[in-house]
Image: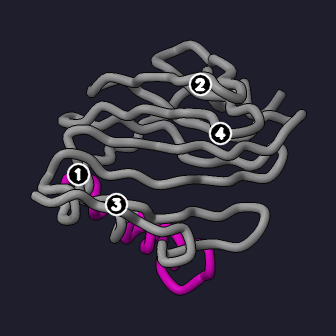
Amino acid sequence: MTTLLVRHDEAEQLGSTPDTMTLLADVSQTDGHLSTNRACLGRGRDGATPHFHTSSAEMFFMLDGELDVLNGDDIVTVRTGDMLFVPPHTTHAFGATARSGADVLIVFTPGVERFEYFRMIDRIRRGEASPAEILATQERFDNHFVDSAAWRAARAA
């Protein structure tokens, strides 16, 4: 394993303003140690729906703004400079608060294949793929979708 430097201008960008995803490092680039991306969401915009991972922990570091995060059955607000750690098997979801957009660095460790997952989500958002395709990849990407009454209520408010 060698040191990895990813220049901002060379990183793959998905989506369009205000909702963008910057793919920084995938598991194949870090010898399995981590995978990481940067997500920017417009005010009140949803990020990930409720889900859990069986093998990876997920860390959220807020670069700017505010992010509501489902953590089990609780909703926590993560603000600029805050870090939130979500262990494996913990149901979580996230979205920008109604007051603010969100700019967040997300790290998975140990690393899991994520870039193809994010590309698939981007294709679904553009109408080039079906949401059923993402459901068929839950095991492959260790992204298991669940329902959360607490998250639905919080996002409806």
Q: Are the residues flagged by discs 3 and 4 in contact, CB closer than 8 Å?
A: no
Find the residue positioned furthest to the right: 99
Q: Position of residue 76 (x, y in %)?
A: 63, 17
What residue would you read off at disc 4? Answer: 63
Q: How many marks?
A: 4
119 in magenta: yes
> Mark 4, mark 1: which one is toward the viewer?
4
Q: Earlier in the sequence, mark 3 or mark 4?
A: 3
What residue would you read off at disc 2? Answer: 149
Answer left or right for 42 relative to 28.
right
- Type of amino acid under label 4: Leu
> Mark 2, mark 1: which one is toward the viewer?
1
Chosen colour scheme? one colour
Quadrant of residue 14 in the image? Answer: bottom right
- Type of amino acid under label 3: Ala
- Give the quadrant of the N terminus: bottom left
Residue at 84% from the left image edge and 46% from the top image edge: 43
Residue 81 visible? The answer is yes
Find the residue positioned furthest to the top: 74
Q: Secondary structure at mark 1?
A: loop
Query: Overall secondary structure of the magenta stretch?
Result: helix
125 in magenta: yes
Cα separation between marks 3 and 4: 18 Å
Look at the image and give the residue range highlighted in magenta: 118-139
What residue would you read off at disc 1? Answer: 112
> Mark 2, mark 4: which one is toward the viewer?
4
Residue 124 visible? The answer is no
Answer left or right for 82 relative to 32.
right
Q: Position of residue 78 (x, y in %)?
A: 65, 24
